[in-house]
Image: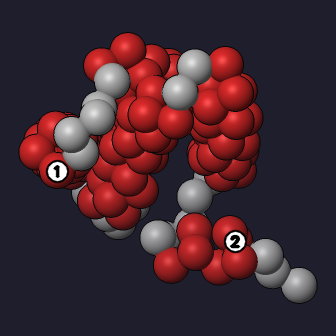
Amino acid sequence: MKSEFDEITEKLGGLPTQLKKMLMRQIVVAGLMFIIIVNIYSVNIAYSLLIGFGSVIGGFLLAFPIAKLNKKGQPASTVLINILKAELVKLLFIIVMLWLAFKFYGDIQPFGLVLGLAISALMSGLAISKLDNK
């Protein structure tokens, strides 16, 4: 029986196992850090942290199907263009999310936002660097 997470990732074109683990770990780390920061600091810093995490995770989920577009039988230049398009979509999504956060959330805390962005981006980079290229 498939979990809801598997069904969602299947709709995205199927994520490799390492990337599924990365997404789940990011969600768990974001939740734990949210709870810890709310108890130690404030809810505004914790929300800012979630905005940072959410921007990177959302950008990844939006860009992955573009990067994965039918690679078999295509020249390397086409694959590279798809990857560059995916990165552009991801960056634009992150920029728009951050702009919306600064525009509509008056109590944003830069420390929490940068912490969420940095941790999420590092976790994404580590997961992608460990992908099995078989």
Measured as percent of width and height from the top left, residue 40 is found at: 67, 19
| Colouring scheme applied when the structure was drawn | secondary structure
Residue drawn 43% across the image and 34% down it? 44
x, y percentage for residue 83?
A: 25, 43
Count of numbered circles on the image:
2
Residue 72 x/y as whole percent:
39, 60
Say whether residue 130 is left or right of residue 66.
right
Disc number for residue 104: 1
Judge whether residue 86 can be spotted in this image.
yes
Tag 1: residue type? Phe
Nearest the eye: 45 or 91: 45
| Viewer-side residue, 128 vs 56 | 56
> In the current view of this chain or complex, which residue is farthest to the bottom?
1
**Which dot, 1 or 2, sits closer to the camera?**
1
Instruction: Give the Cα distance between marks 1 and 2.
Output: 33 Å
First of labels 1, 2 by sequence position = 2
Is residue 128 visible in the rendered structure shown here?
Answer: no
**Residue drawn 10% across the image and 45% down it:** 103
Q: Position of residue 67 (x, y in %)?
A: 32, 52
- Residue underneath mark 2: 6
User: Is label 2 in a helix, a strand or a loop?
Assistant: helix
Q: For the C terminus, which image quadrant?
A: top right
Residue that appears at 70% across and 27% down: 39
Identify the secondary structure beneath mark 1: helix
- Placement of 104 over or under 43, stated as above or below: below
Characterize the local packing of mark 1: few (<14), some (14-19) or many (20 or more) Cα atoms within 10 angstroms: few
Q: Is residue 132 above or below residue 100?
A: above
- Vertical comparison of 72 with 126: above or below: below
Q: Quadrant of the N terminus?
A: bottom right
Q: Amino acid at mark 2?
A: Asp
Q: Compare residues 48 and 9 and report the one nearer the observer.
A: 48
- Residue 9 figure quarter: bottom right
